[in-house]
Amino acid sequence: MAEKNEYVRQVAEQKYEHGFTTDVYTDIIPVGLTEDVVRLISQKKGEPEWMLEFRLKAFRYWQTLKQPTWAHVNVPEIDYQAISYYADPMAKKKNANLTEDGKIDPELEKTFDKLGIPLEERLALSGVAVDAIMDSVSVKTTYKDKLKEMGIIFMSIGEAIKEHPDLIKEYLGSVVPYRDNFFAALNSAVFSDGSFVYIPKGVRCPMELSSYFRINAAGTGQFERTLIIADDDSYVSYLEGCTAPMRDENQLHAAIVEIIVKDRAEVKYSTVQNWYPGDENGKGGVLNLVTKRGDLRGESSKLSWTQVETGSAITWKYPSCVLRGDNSVAEFYSVAVTNNYQEADTGTKMIHMGRNTKSTIISKGISAGHSQNSYRGLVRATSKAHGARNYSSCDSLLLGSQCGAHTFPYMDIRNNTAVVEHEATTSKISEAQLLYCNQRGISTEDAVGLIVNGYAKEVLQKLPMEFAVEAQKLLSVSLEGSVG
Amino acid sequence: MTQYIELYNEILPLLQKQSHPVLNAQREETMALFAQQGFPDKSVERYRYTDVAASFAPNYGLSLAPLTIKDVPYVYAIKDAPIDVSPYYNKVNRPNPSLPLREEVDSLTLLNTALAHDAVVIYVPKGEKAKQPIRIENTLNGEQDTMVVRRVLIIMEELAEATIFFVDHANGGSSYLTSQVIEVVAKDGAQLDMYEMEETTEKCHRYSNLYIQVGRNANIRHNGVTLSNGVTRNGIDVYLQGECSEVTLNGAVIADRKQHVDVNTLIDHQVPQCVSNELYKYVADDQAVGAFAGRILVREGAQQTISHETNNNMCASEEARIYTQPMLEIYADDVKCAHGSTVGVMDEAALFYMQQRGIPLEEARTLLKNAFISQVIDEMKWESFRDRLHILVDKRLSKEERCGSCKICK
Amino acid sequence: MLEIKNLHATVGGKEILKGVNLTINDGEIHALMGTNGAGKSTLSNVIVGNPAYEVTEGSITFDGQDLLAMSADERANAGIFMSFQMPVEIPGVSMTNFMKAAVNARRKARGEEPMKAAEFIKLMKEKRQLVEIDQKLMSRSVNEGFSGGEKKRNEIFQMAMLEPTFCILDETDSGLDVDALRIVATGFNKLRTEKTSAMVITHYQRLLDYIKPDIVHVLIDGKIVMTGGPDLAQKIEDEGFDWIKNNA
């Protein structure tokens, strides 16, 4: 046992690789949240009146709500008046981050380079278009013109509000209305930036679209908003990555992602979330409280969520699917790793409404240190969902005697033609497995990495190539030496 | 809720005069807590599938008749109990008897404690083995709509062994509301095989909470069967407090018409090296509602826990509803825990095969339902009950009249 | 007598049978051969009334009764039996209970009282010996854990129990070794009466060596394109279907 504890201690001392700050000038508005702040955000972004109205409605509703407590996490008391709701590293004041000829501040560019995110097209990984978001503002969207030729719109949501108001008016809030929950209302009031994607009818987006989120400024929150619309017979694969510097205080991240999938269209949404998880004593770290939902409106539409969650002090997110169209197919693949004092409560909701709809849930939780890792999911088949099928499998792997792994699935079945199956197991890496590896000359650390990666393989395989490699590396880093 | 507070105030003098001091000693505190909490509504996680307030809303006459206990070995009215039961009464209903009566104690258990006028004590002394199954029959009778408050305390001393069978019947067309709390203490090495069967009418509402505290090396089996009822919500909490014990929960539910059956279990592994198994099977037809929520809690330090939980459901009609919620909450790493739950349809290929052999569709469906439920029945240990239950289920599924005069139910 | 006229049938919206005409008189054995996907299994499933198949046109009568108006169990009780190509497993339903239900359903259809338990056990034993099936299998669930050969033998056992007048053997020889094939086929022959007629679906002459057909049909693309005597089967085994396709 003593040895195990030693390992746990070592894990706790793992350093967060992305914990540097970037020295650029950032325009931060004063802390606090009032109607005036909402107006100020809207004004700073030069938004039209209808957008301001949208925000104000959400803000007024948010004021009537209390932060929910049902998840299996201990969210620290958040003082919403102590957070700044807008930080702009691009602000064109003195020391502006854009150089005279309109180039991005080299400091800023270095940041994204360190993260492995190429901003300039010449550095870009082939076939990946990137929308990089630092703090609240979209820094640069690469490949925009190339995509434009195909009719694909890929830009920051701030730009889209100005350039494509009709699409925004029609779809924004149509999947996650501001009344959905506390954080959805908050986001709807103060969201700063995010990505907007529109794939026209019959178009297969030829490259992976990617956004990279980074919280840099201290004492700020990030409230990005992503809206993806896949029109009939279209296809897109979208990647999302997240990091934040090490800071002692908690940083709040309350995002909304809305996806609309029309007839026969397919969307793949992959996330590698590596926000700063806090230090070995649970100090600091990002509070990641996110609402992600896809509306499979069209018949035979398909949506697939894949997530690798290794960061954040607290993760509270349930990428969900509403299977409205007949024959629609939804998938959720997740690996969630928690270490030290991290807490994750994540899972999905599959709401079957159309006929012959199918969903699959594969969740792999890995807990180490003093962390708590929960799967929470809902599968519902409404009375109209004839022939609905669901298969869920939720496994937990425990690496240490002080962590927790929990499974809370809910199944509400109102249809006698629905077939729903759920299974879950909890296990640890067995001594026998480790001994076997050791005997073959593999160190315990490597063996753990090997076994964990094997355990998560089913999910990692679903990630696009570039992401899979990063995710695999992340898994080993966040768990290095956690079993003895 | 106010009607129950008023009722309490009204009958309190009578209760205090008639009832045993051990019961009276707990009333005030529990009633005060109940008044604070009220009936659990759907925001209370463990009651999300059953509308408690609706069941308790009508006006029932409260039955205060003292218990009649025939000459059954090991069974006593509380006044005749062979030992002082105050260390147990209203203490088993929480993870550990030393914990104070906190607000977390189920509010229906609080109400039961406040209103209990008598209690059954089953006491099996150290090392004794009850040769015959102990049978407790609850028959709901009478012209009036009645509320029954039933309270049972089972104490299995070290190495005691018993099979205990509870059966609920109802006669006539009156409405009945049963509030039941059973507290079980199974000390080191005790072996208890417990059966609860409900065969009542659609006008019966049953709210039962069963609490079991388990010592070392004990073996506990609980077998719950609901064949016919109105609204039933059965809570079962098992607290494993001694190492190397094993607990098995089996449940079979057959629900049709507007039957509502909600089973909510907690198995609390507090110590290492215990084993728990759960198997619940439901067949829901017509407009019936079946709900199952089972939480396995493995506390920090409860290493080498082995736990299996399975809930299989057959949704046999368009309007039937199934809610299932198997939960694992694990704070120890050296454990083997698994749960599975399914909601399925009848196997079309099997139905067609049987029809090809000349078996009419309805009968083929009955055969499949029967086969489905039989798998739980076969897990039950008491042979004559098992055999009888096969027949009862058969009759029940073929919609014949329910029994009433068999050896087991009598 | 089974009479099929201009039968069209679809499965999953796709037309498989495109006008089948076939008459099988009492006591006759007909072999049905044809390429994969020609519609052989569809035809047998339509005859026994599998609800997954939809008849869009045509008629089937059996001893003068309109089969298409009857449910699958009514057809079975009228004397039609199918030995399935892949018999389904029914967990939890014991063979004994299953057979009891089937036998009594048939008796009920004939206006007879259910069979007495002792009589039923005797009957089971007698038929079991006839088809050389192990008693152990009877205490198991229907087809559960049976080997391929055991499943096929179990089909013939059920046929023995139910005494049908018209049998469909749907690729009963598939997956059987020679010994098992012999046992199944001789079992079938022992059970035949003068009135028993059958439709044997197979790809191979092998089975027809044991169960000798009176008439052989070739089904291609949803239609019977050729009918002949027993020698036709041998010719197909030797030369395949191409020459028929070319003729047609």
Image (cartoon, helix red, strand yellow):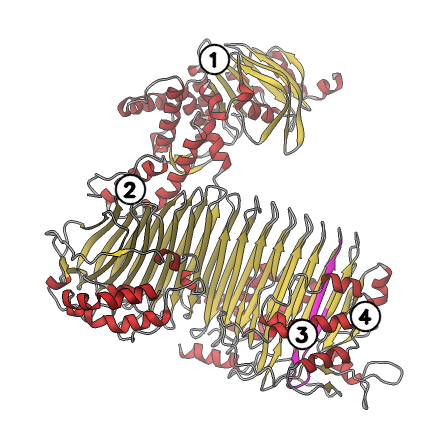
Q: CA distance from mark 3 to mark 4?
A: 18 Å
Judging by the rendered image, the residue that carries numbered circle 3 is A189
Which image quarter holds the N terminus of chain B?
bottom left
Judging by the rendered image, the residue that carries numbered circle 1 is C196
Q: Position of residue C224 (x, y in %)?
A: 66, 17
Using the image, name the chain to which the residue with label 2 belongs.
B
Is residue A345 visible in the rendered image? The answer is: yes
Query: What range of the chain is rendered magenta?
Result: A211-231
User: Is C57 in front, or is B113?
Assistant: B113
Look at label 3 and name its amino acid: Ala
Q: Nearer the viewer, mark 1 or mark 4?
A: 4
Image mark for residue A162? 4
The 10 Å Cα crowd at callout 4, few under 14, some 14 to 19, many 20 or more, is: some
Look at label 4 and name its amino acid: Lys
Badge 1 marks a residue whose secondary structure is loop
Is residue A208 visible in the rendered image? The answer is: no
Q: CA distance from mark 2 to mark 4?
A: 71 Å
The 10 Å Cα crowd at callout 3, few under 14, some 14 to 19, many 20 or more, is: many
Look at label 2 and name its amino acid: Leu
**A282 above or below C35?**
below
Judging by the rendered image, the residue that carries numbered circle 2 is B389
**A60 above or below B345?**
below
Look at label 1 and name its amino acid: Thr
Q: CA distance from mark 2 to mark 3?
A: 61 Å
- Have a look at marks 2 and 4 and say if they share a chain: no
User: Is B337 in front, or is A58?
Assistant: A58
Asked whether the beta carbons under mark 1 and mark 4 sit within 8 Å of each other, the answer is no
Please indicate whether residue B144 sits to the left or right of residue A140 in the image.
left
